[in-house]
């Protein structure tokens, strides 16, 4: 059993090693959340996202209208915030055959919120650091499609 100061030193050393591993993975794989902003209205961005998502053969599986929900609870000045969940069953089947646990990364998610007079769109990329290179290839291909959706919405002002 480790006691006193040596115990704290060991815990800090382990924490430091863990942080180094996490930091190196982040540096190697880049950020998992990609953001962009536009001067388009919140409603226009939602409509364009719906189009861009369905145009790429995804189905919208859910929406969380967080801003609306908070306003209904009495936070009357809370801005619009929405999370859109979407998936493609063929992609889901493909990843299930590669690694059933990786399906936890799906459905894909994209968020929209307002900040400082702009509409901000954020998407969550799939991790590309899996032990199986086939899963990484799948994630990279999916991330390309997700970036296309973001670009579509942000490019037309």
Image (tube, grey):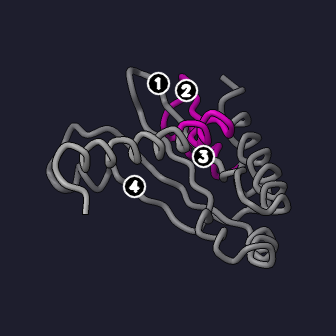
Q: Which circle marks residue 47 in the picture? A: 3
Q: Quadrant location of the C terminus?
A: top right
Label 3: state its secondary structure: helix
Q: Which circle marks residue 37 in the picture? A: 2
Left or right for 151, reference 11: right
**First reached walking from the N terminus: tag 1 or tag 3:** 3
**Magenta-tinted stretch:** 23-51
Q: Mark 4 sits on what residue?
A: 65
Distance between mark 4 and mark 1 Cα atoms: 18 Å
Disc 1 to disc 2: CB gap under 8 Å: yes
Q: Mark 1 sits on what residue?
A: 118
Give coordinates of residue 98: x percent, y percent. Answer: 80, 73
**First reached walking from the N terminus: tag 2 or tag 3:** 2
Distance between mark 1 and mark 2 Cα atoms: 6 Å
**First reached walking from the N terminus: tag 2 or tag 4:** 2
Label 4: state its secondary structure: loop
**First reached walking from the N terminus: tag 1 or tag 2:** 2
Label 2: state its secondary structure: strand
Q: Which circle marks residue 11 in the picture? A: none
Left or right for 8, reference 4: right
């Amino acid at each position: 059993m480790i006691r006193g100061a040596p115990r704290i030193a060991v815990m800090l050393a382990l924490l430091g090693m863990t942080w180094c591993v996490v930091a190196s993975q982040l540096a190697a794989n880049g950020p998992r959340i990609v953001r962009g902003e536009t001067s388009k209205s919140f409603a226009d961005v939602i409509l364009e996202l719906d189009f861009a998502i369905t145009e790429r053969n995804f189905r919208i599986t859910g929406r969380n209208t967080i801003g609306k929900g908070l306003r209904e609870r009495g936070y009357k000045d809370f801005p619009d915030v929405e999370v859109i969940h979407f998936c493609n069953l063929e992609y889901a089947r493909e990843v299930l055959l590669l690694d059933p646990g990786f399906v936890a990364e799906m459905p894909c998610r994209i968020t929209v919120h307002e900040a400082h007079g702009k509409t901000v769109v954020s998407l969550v990329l799939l991790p590309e650091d899996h032990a199986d290179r086939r899963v990484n290839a799948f994630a990279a291909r999916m991330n390309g499609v997700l970036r296309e959706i973001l670009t579509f919405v942000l490019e037309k002002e």
